[in-house]
Amino acid sequence: MAKEVKVKDAKELKKITVGDSINYIRQKAGQTVKLQIEAAETQLTKFQQDHAIIQSTSTIAIPKAYSAQMIKMLQTVDSLKAIKPEPTKLYNGKKPEEVIAVVVEAKISANGGEEAIRNFVLSPDGKKCYGATENPDMSPEK
């Protein structure tokens, strides 16, 4: 059975431009690297703590293995800190102010059921729906 979806009271929340999208991509990439650095630093701290405990109670081979892992983790942290995100080529030739999508809020109901408010990302002309979003502000933090 096909669902009959009714949409009403749609209102525009935000126009998304090429510039917005580029900014979002940059910020998201920066957050990803930051999380990877934090995870690597946490792992390094754990290795250091374990190394301190094992060094006094174990044979030489185990502390050496931990030292090798700590060196690798330090190199990983240094490599992650050196990452400089490359500019996206996704929008080459497009102007930063060009609108590429619109976020709308609408009341919807399926098969005459209960109404719900949802946010959707549409093409600039409103003819295509790219999908629903829980992040209508298109904030990279979410």
Image: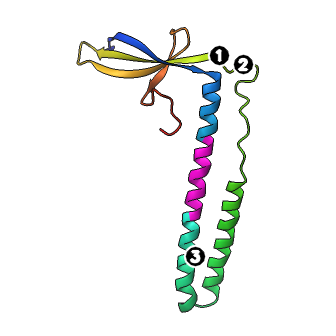
Residue drawn at (72%, 46%), measured in percent from left and top? 84
Q: Which mark is residue 48?
A: 3
Q: Residue at x 58, y 40 (%)?
A: 28
Region in magenta: 29-41
Q: Position of residue 5 (x, y in %)?
A: 33, 12
Judged from the image, the secondary structure of the residue bearing numbered disc 1 is loop
Q: Amino acid at mark 3?
A: Gln
In the picture of the structure, the residue carrying the numbered disc 2 is 94
Tell me the CA gap for discs 3 and 1: 51 Å
How many marks overall?
3
- Is 36 inside the magenta-drawn segment? yes
User: Type of residue at label 1?
Assistant: Glu
Disc 3 or 2, which lies upstream in sequence? 3
Residue type for callout 2: Lys
Q: Secondary structure at mark 2?
A: loop
Snapshot quadrant of residue 1:
top left
Question: Circle 2: is it few (<14), some (14-19), or many (20+) Cα within 10 Å?
Answer: few
Q: x and y percent of residue 78 in the render? A: 70, 60
Q: Nearer the viewer, mark 3 or mark 1?
A: 1
Tell me the distance, in whole angstroms, between the alpha carbons under discs 1 and 2.
Answer: 7 Å
Q: Nearer the viewer, residue 22 or 8?
A: 22
Residue named by callout 1: 98
> Residue 122's mark?
none
Residue drawn at (53%, 77%), measured in percent from left and top? 49
The reply to whether the C-beta atoms of the residues labelled 1 and 2 are less than 8 Å apart is: yes
Q: Looking at the image, which residue is at 73% across and 35% down?
A: 87
Mark 1 and mark 3 in contact (Cβ < 8 Å)?
no
**Which class describes the residues within 10 Å of circle 3: few (<14), some (14-19), or many (20+)?**
some
Q: Could you tell me if the residues under marks 3 and 2 are in contact, i.e. CB atoms within 8 Å?
A: no
Spatial CA distance of label 3 from label 2 is 49 Å
